[in-house]
Image (spheres, helix red, strand yellow):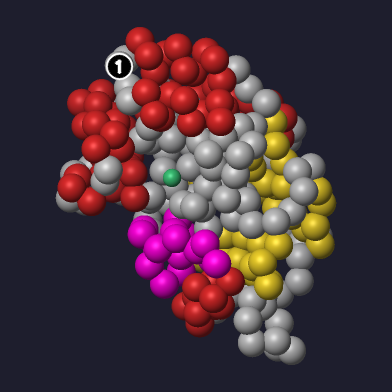
């Protein structure tokens, strides 16, 4: 089965539409959380994701914040402003949708979480040492995560005690070997100095991971953010890709 793997859309509908057009046909979609926060289109992004076939969608920290489940003081001032703006804008139906999202989902041979298998909402996997410890917190061969907005692969073998970190090249096609933790990168707010939207296609029979980047109309999104008086720092970072 050809499965679209997306994460950290962050209310950026233009990036999401570009990914969906670029992805071609897929039989299922796995969304690793953070549908909202930062961007100008929270309701539209939730509705678009909900329309995807055989969807599994997880709760991210920004989604939890929009639901009032997280103390806003744990966010920096600009992120807090974006969360409050999102809270006011979300429709009751979309809030209800977010409220029912799970923190973890297992679809053999993959465990899905937003942050890490150890702390599904909050922990960032930013280095091999932290990733290595997290292999003890899931039982499947693979774990897909988002949250860091960095497209990376951590591979743990029996021969070596520390997971190896790979940063795949855009448009690369990788044959997976157990065990691995994989991050498809961020659709709506990349942070690896490449502003193009990031995503992956997982083939659950061939066990392959196609990691892709696609350009989208960043200026149009930035203009919508300006129109809504969203924080300047969030507007600028979209075109810088950090
Ligand atoms: Zn995020």
* Residue, disc 1: 229
Would residue 196 be seen by someone viewing this image from the given angle? Answer: yes
Vertical position of residue 168 compared to residue 207: above or below: above
Residue neighbourhood size for the residue with mark 1, other residues' Cα within 10 Å, grouped as few (<14), some (14–19), many (≥20): few
At 52% from the left and 62% from the top, the residue drawn is 126
Q: Secondary structure at mark 1?
A: loop
Q: Is residue 44 above or below residue 128?
A: above
Q: Which range of residues does the magenta coloring cover?
A: 108-127
Relative height, residue 203 to residue 228 (above, below) = below
Is residue 163 shown left or right of residue 33?
right
Q: Magenta stretch: residue 115 in it?
A: yes
Q: Nearer the viewer, residue 132 or 24?
A: 132
> In which image quadrant can residue 19 be found?
top right
- Percent across and percent down for residue 127 are 55, 67
Q: Is residue 169 left or right of residue 125?
A: right
**Residue 32 on the magenta segment:** no
Residue 213 drawn above or below residue 160 = above
Q: Position of residue 185 (x, y in %)?
A: 59, 47
- Give how far across and how far down residue 2 sits, in percent: 72, 48
């Amino acid at each position: 089965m050809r499965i679209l793997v997306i994460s950290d859309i962050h209310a950026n509908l233009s990036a999401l539409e570009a990914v969906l057009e670029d992805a071609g046909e897929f039989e299922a979609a796995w969304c690793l959380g953070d549908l909202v926060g930062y961007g100008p289109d929270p309701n539209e992004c939730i509705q678009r994701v909900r329309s995807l076939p055989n969807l599994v969608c997880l709760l991210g920290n920004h989604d939890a914040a929009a639901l009032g489940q997280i103390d806003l003081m744990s966010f920096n001032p600009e992120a807090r402003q974006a969360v409050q703006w999102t809270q006011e804008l979300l429709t009751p139906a979309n809030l209800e949708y977010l409220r029912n999202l799970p923190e973890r989902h297992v679809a053999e041979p993959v465990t899905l979480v937003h942050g890490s298998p150890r702390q599904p909402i909050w922990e960032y996997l930013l280095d091999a040492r932290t990733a290595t410890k997290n292999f003890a917190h899931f039982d499947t061969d693979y774990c897909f995560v988002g949250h860091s907005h960095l497209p990376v692969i951590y591979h743990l073998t029996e021969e070596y005690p520390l997971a190896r970190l790979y940063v795949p090249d855009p448009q690369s096609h990788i044959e997976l070997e157990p065990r691995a933790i994989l991050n498809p990168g961020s659709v709506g707010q990349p942070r690896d100095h490449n502003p193009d939207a990031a995503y992956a296609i997982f083939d659950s029979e061939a066990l392959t991971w196609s990691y892709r980047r696609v350009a989208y109309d960043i200026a149009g999104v930035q203009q919508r953010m300006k129109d809504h008086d969203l924080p300047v720092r969030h507007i600028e970072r979209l075109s810088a890709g950090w």
